[in-house]
Amino acid sequence: MESFSYLHLGEPEDPDRNVVCRYRVTTDLPMEKAAEAIAAEQSTGTWTSISTLDGSIFEDLGARITSIDGDIVTCEFPAADFSIETGAVPQILSVIAGNLFGLGSLKAVRLEDVTFPKSILEQFKGPKFGAAGIRQALHRPEEPLVGTIVKPKIGLSPEKTAEYVYEAGAGGLTNSKDDETLVDQAFCPIEDRTIRVAESLDRLQEEGHYMMHAVNISTRSDRILELAEKVQGWGARELMIDVVTCGYGCLQALAEDPSIKVPIHVHRTMHGAFTKDPLHGINMLALTKLVRMCGGDALHIGTLGVGKMAAGAHDDSNLRACLGDDVPYKAVMPVCSGGVHPALVGEIVKRSGFDVQIQAGGGVAGHPGGVRAGARAMSQAVDAAYKGIPADEYAKTHGELAVALREWGSR
Ligand code: CAP
Ligand code: MG
């Protein structure tokens, strides 16, 4: 039986025709063997030679290892390995991030990055609104967007949620959102909540302030579009989806449906299960690229090394993947969230620039003066950062910010 080698070391990469993946591999095997095991398992091979694999299948569809640099293995998959004109993320993930994670011969393996050729990128539509569309709806062309997550995560009634949103808007916030665990519980039915929150947003608009609240519609894939349409009908100006728990197909179905006429805020809850281990799993960067392809308008990217969630300091790769012009889609609004409070805003903006949505749940609702004061403090912190004034300097004439800095400044 013929045996085939997947090693093409030293041959030039061809990202215009292939999906190119970089894997970080930890193994006791010689690296060439480990790399071949990945290429074989994920394309035309298995653990042994097989009589049904002929030369032309291997030539056309076999993955190619084009380089091994320390523990980084570059593997190219021919575009023909992927479904035709469907934009099918499940099948893409089964190839680039499938069985390899379970291979017993590897101690650990992490998909660090992926690039797609034009023929695959063209199967996707990207965001309908994107960062620019959200900014336009909010009449806020340049400054960072500044938001909150209604806290507590669960427990507030529709009335209390709407009151929270009103107070947040009255304090100057441009955005608010449901938390990832709130959808349609008995204590806060989604219909009542959406209607009351819409009333708060309308009231704010009559007073001259534009604001969006993302309503979390994460549910079964066979119901999500119907729920999205209902929620829109109840006055929602933005939808939210937990993309990892719902699946990319849900996001794509919403983003591509012409009946959905509001932006989609994408939360990434559960991503830590596969992004946190530096040696095993999937780098958030791959997720960010897929979310943009599938049409997310705003996406959580972490807080760039500050805040409560683990994050690579100074790792701006997700920010660039949201905003970069190397793909044929609108830019995604990057959302920095997780343990944010006014004292951290200056540092975040230093790392992110102004094309970002900064949001705080505890950092608004935890303000000693209440939600409106907390919202004011966050808005003041963003204004200070935008004007290039140190927060403690700005706080001398902005009382809510001064209180926030006293409360959290040392954290
Ligand atoms: C932030 C948040 C988000 C986290 C998730 C929360 O609240 O709404 O879910 O940001 O992490 O409930 O924790 P706080 P990430 O402002 O009160 O921390 O954005 O990194 O996916
Ligand atoms: Mg949350």
Image (spheres, helix red, strand yellow):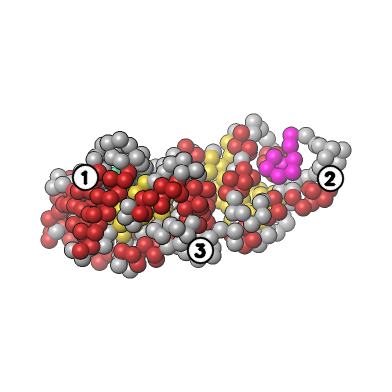
Query: In percent of the image, x 28 and y 45: which residue is there?
Result: 192
Relative height, residue 3 to residue 132 (above, below): above
The furthest residue to the top: 104
Q: Earlier in the sequence, mark 1 or mark 3?
A: 1
What amino acid is labelled 3 in the image? Tyr
Q: Residue at x 75, y 40 (%)?
A: 45
The reply to whether callout 3 and callout 2 are in contact (CB within 8 Å) is no
Give the secondary structure at mark 2.
loop
Percent x, y of residue 284: 48, 47
Cα distance in 3D space between marks 1 and 2: 66 Å
Note whether residue 121 is visible.
yes
| Range of magenta residues | 40-47
Query: What residue would you read off at disc 2?
Result: 54
Q: Is residue 246 left or right of residue 41?
A: left
Residue 379's place in the image compared with 360, above or below, is below
- Ligand 1 under 8 Å from disc 3 Cβ: no
Asked whether, in this view, residue 75 is left or right of residue 379, the answer is: right
Q: On the rendered image, what quadrant is the C terminus found in?
A: top left
Q: Secondary structure at mark 1?
A: helix
Mark with earlier residue (1, 2)? 2
Which of pointers 1 and 3 indicates the residue nearer the eye? 1
Q: Which amino acid type corresponds to the residue marked 2 in the rendered image?
A: Asp
Label number found at residue 329: 3
Looking at the rendering, in which quadrant would you find the N terminus?
Answer: top right
Residue under the image location 34 percent in, 49 percent down: 215
Q: What label does residue 159 carry, if any? A: 1
3 with respect to 396 (left or right): right
